[in-house]
Structures are given as structure tokens and as C-alpha cells.
Amino acid sequence: MRLFVLTLIGYALCLGQTPPEGCTPNSLNIPGSPYPCIHADNRVTLRVTAPDAQKVQVRLGGAHDMKRQEDGSWMVTIPPQVIGFHYYSIVVDGAVLADPATRTFFGSGWDNSAVEIPEPPGVDYYLPKDVPHGQVSQRRYFSKVTGKWRRCYVYTPPDYDGGNGRYPVLYLMHGWGENEQGWHTQGHADLILDNLIAEKKAKPMIIVMDNLNTAKPGEDATIFSARWLWPPPPPETTQGGAAPARRGLAGFTGAAFTEMMLTDLIPMIEKTYRVLPGRENRAMAGLSMGGMQTFLTTLANLDKFAYIGGFSGSTGGRGGTFDPKTSNGGVFADAAAFNQKVKVLFLGIGTEEGPGTKNFSKALTDAGIHNVYFESTGTAHEWLTWRRCLHDFAPRLFK
């Protein structure tokens, strides 16, 4: 309770403070909050009020000690951060907290604060523009496979309401430690599609964003539990985007989600929305663990999907062991048959993530499998990589 009160006091006091000259409030701050703020060189200044605390840190690109001020607040200016979205947290005498001055974003298994280091002027493909906008709505449905109520978010394109046309569907998956909100809050999938559709670069489509955290009755669901994170991971595992796979992920098979998707999710979507039928009008893609899930689901069900996208996920050829005759159940063994079924196989990665995906793409090409390899220059395992992947992937769909 004491820490909670302190954070509320800190929030109230921060609203009245003026940031340093030239330091622009973070775009993800709650209205009226001047901190965190971002300098022209991408340094970030943060401020928290905790007058009774003995030690305060911020975890953003590493752990940074904050300095006590005369008014009881704590401040620090941290080194320049790379462009894009960054989770961060505040540590007050060992207690890890979200900063009440920002909105919170679910990632790495819990609600974090975040800063957005802006792109250079003119890069606006994921920003709101004066174009027709679609809608993102939540849809609850009961899953017979899990025996539970579930929630997904559904993007419908600008001309959906008031019309009678039918649309193809992209099922878009989040990463480990995230949930069904990630793609439209952190990823801005709706704005990316709004802008592409307005530019006539992508076909209008429905996007379904569901939660990968799926277990059947009696199955062990601790792989997805936030308790794996307590005590919270060291800061280097949470900067940027989704955290890397951890101990629980070793047992991940994706079977429950695949069964739920085919039994519950797709039938619900096709009953509820004006959807074009057939595999040629169905795509699936995901980031990190969502890319792995995409491959597990689609490659075993090519009669149901014609478009496949992996963003920082599903290299399939770890350690140079890829064999088209045996890998992924031998689905790549007959290149001609695979190429006839799959219209787009997309492999995207940040250049700072290593050569695994590039090597996998080359191995596929050498085996005669058509694929698209995309690199996001200068980015790592983070949302800016995945925004860029979606921006390149979406225009290739449903042609």
C-alpha cells in the first residue's frame, strides 16, 4: 500500500513539472504527463517521486540508478535509445513497478510502461493519417477445445461497415509473454492497414488477433504463466520487444492452439463476419513465438491456408540441420507441390537478430521452395521489426 500511495503522489507531482528544454514528452505518456521525455539525440529523461525510498532505478536498455532530488523526486537521463518501442519498469527499493506516468502494455508476462523513440520525419506508415479508418473490436467466444471463454480482437477495414462485401482474413499472432492486444496497441496493425489500403497497396482484409496462451482441460499451462517471471527477468531480456524464449517455452508444441483455432476460432469468425471462404482467402502470420505457431499450424494444414508469414520466428533450420525431405514433417519434400499450394511464404527478421532466418530462406530456395526474405535494417527482436514486416507482408496477400 505504501508503494502504491507513493506512485500516486509521484504521478500527481510529475504533472506539475516542466521537462528540460528540448525534451519532448513521450507519446505514450498519459495526458498531461511531461515525463518520460525524449531529447533530440534520443536520450530519455525519467522522473519518479518516492521521498521515502532508499534506491530507485529504471530498467530501460539496462539498469540505471536514479538520483534523488531536493523535492523528494528521483531523476535520471539515460543514454540514447534506438528508434522504436521500448518496454521499461521502475524499481523502488527492490519492488518492480510500472511507471504511472505512462500507459501500460502487456509484454514479457506483465504490464510494463513504455517509451516510443520516434522515427525520422516522413516515416509515418504506422501513424494515424487523414484517411478512412477501419475498426478494431473485441469478440468473446466460447471454446469447446479449452472449455473456456476466450477473447480476440478483430480489425475490419474502412469499407466494412455499411457494405455487404466479403473479405479475406489474416490471422495475426503475438509473441511470447504478450497477448491478443499486442498487435493493435504496440504494433499498430490497424493503422498500418488503414494507410496501405488508402494507398491502394493492400487489399481490404479482416485481421483476427487472438491469444496464443491456450491449454486444454488438464494440460499444464505454466509455460504461459507470468509466475515464470518472478523475480522479474534482468533488464537485458525485456528491452525492445517480446522477451526471448525461456525455460517454459521448451515444452511448447502449439497443438492446443491449432486445434482450438480450427475447431472454434475460424468457424466463429466465418459465422460472425462477412468472410470470403476457402484457403485462398486465408492467411496466418506471427511474430517470435507467434511465427513458430504459424508454421506449426499452417504447414500441417495447407488445405486451409495459402499465405504464411513468420516475423522473427520459425527459422526451421537451426544449427544447419534443415533437410527438406524430413524437416517440418517433410512438407517441403515436394517443392512443386508446395509452391502450387502456398502463394506467399514470408520470412522477416531484424538485421541485429542473427543469420538464422537468412540461412533458412537460402536453404528453402536451394530446395526449390519459393519464399520472400525481408530484413528490417538496424532492428532487433522488437516491435519496430514486426511493424516493418507487416508493412511489407500485407501488400503481398490475396492477390
Image: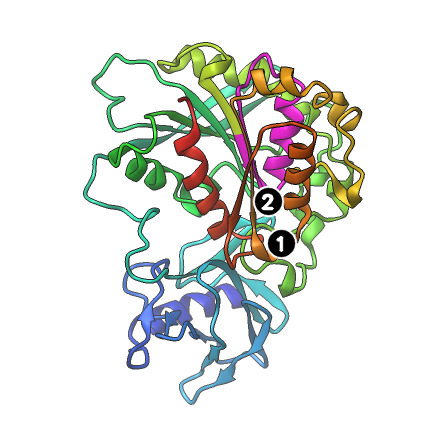
Element assignment for label 2: loop
Q: Which mark is residue 396?
A: none
Residue nearest the observer in this picture, 119 or 322? 322
**Residue 377 at what x, y percent from top left?**
50, 55
Q: Quadrant of the C terminus?
A: top left
Disc 2 target residue: 312
Residue 300 part of the magenta-drawn span? yes
Residue 74 lies, with reference to residue 380, above or below; the image says below
Residue 206 lies, with reference to residue 115, above or below; the image says above
Q: Amino acid at mark 1?
A: Glu
Residue 296's image quarter?
Answer: top right
Total number of numbered discs in the rendering: 2
Element assignment for label 1: helix
Disc 1 target residue: 353
**Residue 142 at what x, y percent from top left?**
53, 18
Identify the residue at image location x=78%, y=43%. 320
Residue 265 part of the magenta-drawn span? no
Residue 279 lies, with reference to residue 292, above or below; the image says above
Query: Residue 146, can we see it?
Result: no
**Residue 347 at what x, y percent from top left?**
57, 38
Q: Amino acid at mark 2?
A: Ser
- Mark 1–mark 2 contact, CB under 8 Å? yes
For marks 1 and 2, the one nearer the N-term is 2
> How far apart are labels 1 and 2 at the CA level?
8 Å
Residues drawn in magenta = 285-313
